[in-house]
């Protein structure tokens, strides 16, 4: 899947070897090494990648082109708490490497909440809070 994505989406000026090297780097960055030769599968019909691995594969497809910004709408939707934590950790790792990551998430667990650098809480379409998770705890405990 990723080699096909790289072939189609990356510049023609890159050699196939360079594209494969980029695929290998993205697989490593997104912790997909253990499942890199696994069939993607069809949920409920053909066994394949887990929900969390599917989400990371989707991020990997986008990460191939090395975008400076990732906007993720509900990246943990439908995942159990372990897989949700895994996906958010991958996004955190990308942000630590200089990528800007913006995501929407409803009702994050306290473990996920602590992974965020900054949070923007909205109520009725307006900003209710902007700051760090620690500042939010202090702000809302008053």
Image (cartoon, rainbow, N blue to C red):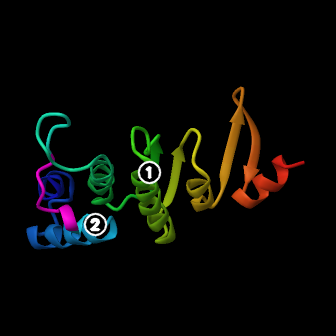
How crowded pointer 1 is (Cα within 10 Å; few <14, some 14-19, many 20+) is rated as many
Secondary structure state at the residue bearing disc 2: helix
Which residue is depicted at the point 41% across and 59% down? 86
Q: Residue 49's mark?
A: none
In the foreground, 119 or 41? 41
Q: Which mark sits nearer the N-terminus, 2 or 1?
A: 2
The answer to which image quadrant residue 67 occupies is bottom left
Magenta stretch prevailing secondary structure: loop
Q: Is residue 57 visible?
A: yes
Secondary structure state at the residue bearing disc 1: helix
How crowded pointer 2 is (Cα within 10 Å; few <14, some 14-19, many 20+) is rated as many
Which residue is depicted at the point 57% across and 61% down? 115
Against 73, residue 48 (above or below) is below
Which residue is depicted at the point 45% across and 59% down? 91
Q: Position of residue 40 (x, y in %)?
A: 15, 48
In the foreground, 14 or 142? 142
On screen, residue 113 versus residue 26, left or right, reads right
Whether the residues at callouts 2 and 1 have beta carbons within 8 Å, the answer is no
Q: Which residues are magenta?
A: 34-40
Which residue is depicted at the point 14% across and 43% down? 41
Against 119, residue 93 (above or below) is below
Count of all numbered marks drawn on residues in the image: 2
On screen, residue 52 versus residue 85, left or right, reads left
Q: Position of residue 51 (x, y in %)?
A: 30, 46
**Residue annotated with mark 2:** 26
Q: CA distance from mark 2 to mark 1?
A: 19 Å
Q: Is residue 35 magenta?
A: yes
**Residue annotated with mark 1:** 84
Q: Position of residue 34 (x, y in %)?
A: 21, 67
Q: Position of residue 125 (x, y in %)?
A: 69, 28
The answer to which image quadrant residue 23 occupies is bottom left
């Amino acid at each position: 899947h990723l080699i096909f994505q790289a072939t189609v989406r990356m510049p023609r000026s890159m050699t196939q070897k360079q594209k494969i090297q980029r695929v290998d780097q993205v697989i490593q960055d997104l912790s997909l090494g253990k499942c890199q030769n696994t069939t993607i599968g069809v949920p409920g019909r053909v066994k394949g990648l887990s929900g969390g691995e599917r989400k990371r594969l989707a991020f990997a497809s986008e990460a191939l082109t090395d975008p400076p910004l990732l906007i993720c709408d509900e990246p943990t939707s439908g995942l159990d708490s372990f897989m949700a934590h895994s996906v958010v950790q991958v996004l955190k790792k990308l942000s630590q490497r200089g990528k800007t990551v913006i995501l929407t998430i409803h009702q994050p667990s306290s473990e996920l909440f602590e992974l965020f650098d900054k949070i923007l809480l909205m109520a009725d379409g307006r900003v209710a809070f902007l700051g760090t998770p620690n500042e939010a705890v202090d702000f809302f405990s008053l």
